Amino acid sequence: MRIDIISVAPNLLESPFNHSIIKRAKDKGLAEIIIHDLRKYGLGNYKQIDDTQFGGGAGMVMMIEPIANCICKLQSERNYDEVIYMTPDAKTLNQSTANTLSLKENILILTGHYKGVDQRIRDKYITKEISIGDYVLTGGELAAAVLVDAVVRLIPGVIGDEQSALTDSFQDNLLSPPVYTRPANYEGMKVPDILLSGNFPKIEDWRSEQAFKRTEQIRPDLIKDE
Ligand code: ADE
């Protein structure tokens, strides 16, 4: 999968993609992540990328031309399955969206700053808008990093133990059950007997039951939404 990201703060995106599982995916040739500095497409000597809002109001708006020029250049080089805009005023990212995006070949992600981008960019170029939660970040870069992480780890071959991604929280709309490792008894706090029993069908039943209980308690909306 190839992921292109357009940003005014490309430095913010360097570290998250150069460690751990994302780095491994890149090293294995399973994901290619390319960051484009929007400033290079800025207008005039000052490489302007934002301007005041029509109609008045605080905060700058990202201008059409630099973004449109950058998107058009990239679109002339390949077809994108999705052109995604990271913004708090959109539907929230969930596991199902991450699953769907992990099957795509090329995706382009636009990150916003200030008051966001001129609406006409959204109308003309954007095929999908994604928020990572009901709070406002300084810019869309960290949100894009979250999206890329959630998607890339699902690409087949990225996580060694295939089962591991499939049994994550949310894959079946349930939170994960509790997990334990050695020691079996820590200062009197014992691991549930069932997990030490070796009875794997029973262990699976216990895990499902625990996942359901936990979801009912912490995120009942996930069960209701089904
Ligand atoms: N940009 C700023 N806040 C954001 C959010 N919550 N999700 C996606 N992009 C954002």
Image (cartoon, rainbow, N blue to C red):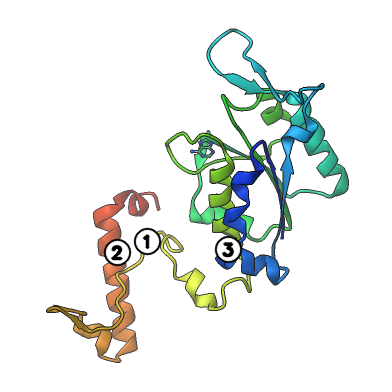
Q: Which residue is mark 1?
A: 174
Mark 2: amino acid: Phe
The disc, 2 or 3, on the residue closer to the chain's N-terminal end is 3
Specify few, some or many for label 1: CA neighbours under 10 Å numbering under 14, 14-19, or 20 or more. Answer: many
Mark 3: which secondary structure? loop
Amino acid type at image mark 1: Leu
Q: Is residue 81 above or below residue 117?
A: below
Residues under numbered marks 1 and 2 in contact, where contact means CB atoms less than 8 Å apart:
yes
Compute the Cα span from label 1 to label 2.
Answer: 6 Å
Residue 19's label in the rendered image is: 3
Q: Is residue 4 left or right of residue 195?
A: right
- SS at mark 1? loop
Whether the residue under disc 3 has CB within 8 Å of ligand 1: no
Whole-angstrom CA distance, mark 2 to mark 3, is 33 Å
Q: Which mark is residue 137?
A: none
The residue tagged 2 is: 212
- Identify the residue at image location x=59%, y=58%: 151
Quarter that holds the N terminus: bottom right
